[in-house]
Amino acid sequence: MINAQLGELGLFTDLYELTMLQAYMAERMTDTAVFTLFVRRLPDCRNFLLACGMESIPGSLEQLRFTSDDLAYLSSLQLFADDFLTWLRAFRFTGDVYAVPDGTPVFANEPILEIVAPLMQAQLVETLVMNQVHLQTVLASKGARVAAAAQGRTVVDFGARRTHGIEAAVQAARALYIAGVAATSNVLAGKLYGIPVAGTMAHSYIQAHGDERDAFRAFARTFPGTTLLVDTYDTLEGVRRVIDLVESTPGEFTVSAVRLDSGDLGALARETRRMLDAAGLQEIGIFASSGLDEHAIAELLAAGAPINGFGVGTGMAVSDDAPALDIVYKLAEYGGAGRTKLSRHKPILPGRKQLFRREEDGRAIGDAIGLAGERLDGRPLLQMTMRGGRQLSVPQGIHMVRNRAAEELARLPPDVTALARVVPPYPVRISNALERHHAQTREAVMTHRRGGRF
């Protein structure tokens, strides 16, 4: 965490979690519960989601504590009994966690994380778990689309200044890199996660000099082989000045690319390429930025714009077309009995589950959600990451996670990874055994409502 140590996150929860916990304690409801994290429906503009953020959950839960200051604050609210505050003081998470690995494509209603723990423990961590998985999954899903639109060209995350806070910016850089974005301008994220960092200059550097040519010359002297921003005053005139400096000081003034950051990027890129090639400077590339997203990038490349790389900021870093998911963390079992809801359009599949992905010739052809003990066709995706409150392994390095994400995305059908909405959607079915368990659980709930018992 950036703004707080893990041990200080006990209060990062919604108040109703704590009030429910105190009520559970008063009722001695201490049996084992299963909670499932899933996304009810995909945004209209998404064919899949790229799960991200699961890797941080075991470490967060392992270190979760309530400090003396936390307990003093809760006491001051005059809501909580002394025995409950004593329970919080001694809190240690002792449950199990099952999750799909970071970088796994997932679909609506699929279990992406399940927690099996005493009811009070599993209830308490809802807010933390949802918070960590939601943001990174939103942004990894967006980043995968942007990277796909770039068709192998370099994409750099420029979004730190407009993300919703410092921690969001750092988590965004991680999620976007896992999704296929090549680098970030965020130096803190580079340090924390080992993500390549990229960036050269802003318009202010050019403006601070009395002459654009002097600014170019000085910066290239300090950073040979740099990328120069050429649109501060007149884009094509800026390109001409770069060409003149290369030609007038051979071997002394070297640049790897020019950056276009305004105007008609397609037309300017074509004219810039023509000018550079005419001067024999084919080795100088063209980097574009300015309000880009996956659709703008796809449109530029479809029109033949000779652009070698893209800087993408706000639209990607806040996922402006789908900034939130209908992600939920729901009780699926308590005391060995399935739990569900009767609300229309909000089903909860009961019990512990497993997610299977069927593949043919290396290509995913459909998923199945089954009970945890079932053996269905396909590759099981949910893996145990925590047992008895302890992490089972050290989190993998970000480069390994990125490579796995690329492999998983390459297994999806091309129409699923395309930008256009796929019809029909990628198939996800529920196993017969899980369907029966769901029906039996619903019947048990309705019987209870009519005056019977679970």
Image: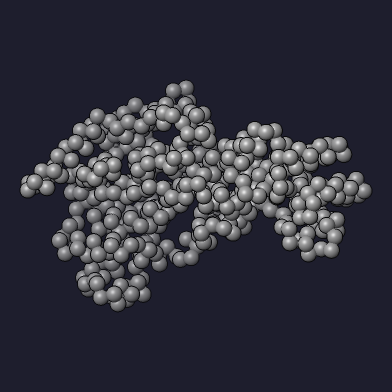
Residue drawn at (18%, 40%) of the image: 442
Q: How many marks?
A: 0
Specify the farthest residue to the right.
Answer: 248
Residue drawn at (44%, 23%) of the image: 360
Q: Is residue 225 left or right of residue 113?
A: right
Observer-nearest of 450 and 96: 450
Query: Which image quarter: residue 377?
Result: top left
Residue 354 visible? The answer is: yes
Instruction: Give coordinates of residue 178: x percent, y percent.
Output: 53, 44
Q: Is residue 365 left or right of residue 245?
A: left
Residue drawn at (70%, 33%) of the image: 304
Residue 97 visible? The answer is: no
Q: How is the image coloured?
A: one colour
Instruction: Give coordinates of residue 112: x percent, y percent.
Output: 37, 43
Residue drawn at (21%, 72%) of the image: 81
Instruction: Give coordinates of residue 388: x percent, y percent.
Output: 30, 52
Please tell me whether residue 293 is drawn above or below residue 427 in the rendered image. below
Specify the farthest residue to the top.
Answer: 361
Observer-nearest of 95 and 344: 344
Specify the farthest residue to the left.
Answer: 451
Instruction: Give coordinates of residue 372: x percent, y percent.
Output: 28, 37
Observer-nearest of 201 and 211: 211
Query: Which image quarter: residue 11?
Result: bottom left
